Amino acid sequence: MKTFTTIKEFLRFRKTIISKKLSLVPTMGDIHDGHKSLIDIAKKKSDLVVVSLFVNPIQFTSIDEYNSYPDTLKRDKDILVKQGVDILFCPNKKEIFPQEFNTSIVINKFISILEGSFRPGHMEGVATIVTKLFNITNPDLAIFGEKDFQQLTLIKSLCKDLNFPIKIISSKTVRDSNGLALSSRNNFLSREEKFQAHEIYKALMYGYEQIIKGEKVAENIVNLIKTRLDNFDLIKVEYVSIRNPKTFEELKIISEDFIILIAAFVGKTRLIDNIKYVEKL
Ligand code: PAF
């Protein structure tokens, strides 16, 4: 695996592989099976896979949250080699965001809803780093997980609006055997918290089943899910929202494709997840 820690070195190398189809898997490290599934897709669809590993300070909502993000570079490198990754791009913070850095990418529709409203600045932070990574690595494809569905939708919108000639590919959420969506944050959960965290996906499934059985009023489904999760003392729901997965518009009556999105604290750890129904792909 070729490893680049500076933009200059990476750009020099990039010129030598222009004839190759390159895919980008952006990560913040702490590589788990969810990332591995993104890498597997990237390998199938391109000649070369670049994984970027950068813990992006501007997408965290507090300095404590940023500082507590695990630094697992050595372990991650070993996993990425085993996974058959060709290139690792792991720049340092000062080079990506020098003191004079003064730009922010704002995707209007996403900054004030769900993740955007509960985590001020987060969506802009993601859009800004992803734009930078696209400009530096210049990939043909980029792969993102469906767990962060609002992020995925935002990135598709960003590519369209800013004319990035990059195909965005989404990858299904990877879950543990009890349905908990894999996330670096799961490492923060105690045994009991993890036990209760499994209820999040169960509640989503329950809501999904009620819609399939005929309940079409979104508010009723939202309330059913919230009420179910109220039984678990360590879970505090931030939002449950039912939207059209293509337009991301909130649905009042569910008569079409839908996605149920949730964010909840389990103890001090904030988790997000979703479940979706799409009739025609
Ligand atoms: O999903 C993530 O890990 C991050 O939000 C991303 C896309 C790597 C940007 O920092």
Image (cartoon, grey):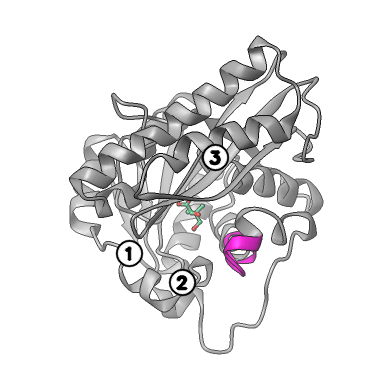
State the CA–CA distance, disc 3 to disc 1.
29 Å
Label 3 CB less than 8 angstroms from ligand 1: no
Q: Are marks 2 and 1 in contact (CB under 8 Å)?
A: no
Q: Is residue 269 left or right of residue 12?
A: left
Q: Is residue 266 above or below residue 48?
A: below
What numbered label is drawn on residue 69? Answer: 1
Q: How far is mark 2 from mark 1, CA to CA?
A: 10 Å
* C-alpha gap between disc 3 and disc 2: 32 Å
Please state which amino acid type lies under the numbered disc 3.
Answer: Lys
> Which of the two labelled residues, at mark 3 and mark 1, occupies the earlier sequence position?
1
Q: Is residue 80 visible?
A: no
Marked residue nearer the N-terminal end (3 or 2): 2
Is 125 part of what is drawn in magenta?
Answer: yes
Q: Amino acid at mark 2?
A: Pro
Is residue 76 one of those drawn in magenta?
no
Q: Nearer the viewer, mark 3 or mark 1?
A: 3
Label 2: element kind: helix
Return the residue at label 3: 226
Q: In the current view of this chain or complex, which residue is farthest to the top?
A: 213
Q: Which quadrant would residue 249 be assigned to in this image?
A: top right
- The label shown at residue 57 is 2
Q: Nearer the viewer, residue 58 or 207?
A: 207
- Count residues near mark 2 (Cα–Cα under 10 Å), then give few for <14, some for 14-19, many for 20+: some
Q: Residue at x 57, y 60 (%)?
A: 126
Q: Which residues are magenta?
A: 117-127
* Kind of residue indicated by mark 1: Tyr
Q: At 68% from the left edge and 72% from the top edge, which residue is drawn? A: 104
SS at circle 1: loop
- Return the x and y of residue 260 as percentages of the image width and height: 62, 33
Q: Is mark 1 within 8 Å of ligand 1?
A: no
